[in-house]
Amino acid sequence: MELKAFVQSYREAFGENAQLPLLFGYSDVAVADTAKIGGCFFKGLQAAREGTPVSLSAEVIGCGGGKLYTGFSDMPERVPNFVSLTEKYKRTPEMVADYVKSLQMPRTTKPYLNFVRADQAESLDGYEGVMFYATPDMLSGLCGWAFYDSNEQDAVVARFGSGCSTVISMTVVENARQGHRCFLGLFDPSVRPWVGNNELSFTVPMSRFAVMLDSMRDCFLFGSHAWQRVKARIQE
């Protein structure tokens, strides 16, 4: 399924009120002249959600953790203490350091990380993953779609992490290994002010998304009475 066909199918499955997902990937070329974002860079992604592409870089991202989890820098020395002792998200700084190491997030060789809404992109080529901002009803559809052609116990996973690690780091690493896992995210209290109070993220690596596209119109999202009732509520 080509990108334009996916956008049409997505709107048919979830309705016009459901926001289109963002495609994200690294590039040597910026798709937008994005001003520096102080603090959490998710506040800057609102523009992409509204249809204006966003290009992140080491210079644009003002948060040290954001630079780390997007692959633009190594872990700043202060991160373990800050996450544990200030934010209190992990019991010890050593646990934070072990967690970051376990992610195995590589340093990117590209200067830009571009975010483009699906209807504003020309194709799926060159992207690492697809990020959906999803309400519980939308998650019902997205998770069900991911489970439709897979019995893997980790077809959809929810892991600890900052918004940028659960959306970017995990997806990038999964795509690099041509993996099948999709990720729930945006549980991090620090990112919550910058997303809707009824939203989480559902992120699919491109390695998995290409497969899911082939089964999309065969699953319950089309022609299922149960889903039509949920879809109607999404449209309210």
Image (tube, rainbow, N blue to C red):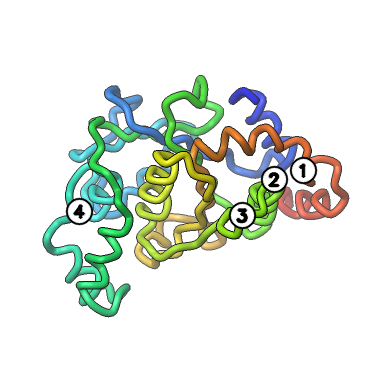
Instruction: Give the residue type that dot 4 points to.
Output: Gly
Q: Quadrant of residue 92?
A: bottom left
CA gap between label 1 and label 4 equals 41 Å
**Where does label 2 land, which residue?**
149
Q: Residue at x 29, y 37 (%)?
A: 56
**In this view, 156 is above or below 113:** below
**Where does label 3 land, which residue?**
152
Left or right of 221? Residue 84 is: left
**Where does label 4 land, which residue?**
64
Circle nearer the viewer, 2 or 4: 2
Answer whether labels 1 and 4 touch (C-beta < 8 Å).
no
**Where does label 1 land, which residue?**
219
CA gap between label 2 and label 4 equals 38 Å
Quadrant occupied by the N terminus: top right
Circle nearer the viewer, 3 or 4: 3
Instruction: Give the residue type that dot 2 points to.
Output: Asp
Left or right of 31? Residue 198 is: right
**In this view, 85 is above or below 51:** below
Q: Residue at x 27, y 44 (%)?
A: 106
Mark 1 lies on a secondary structure that is loop
Circle nearer the viewer, 1 or 3: 3
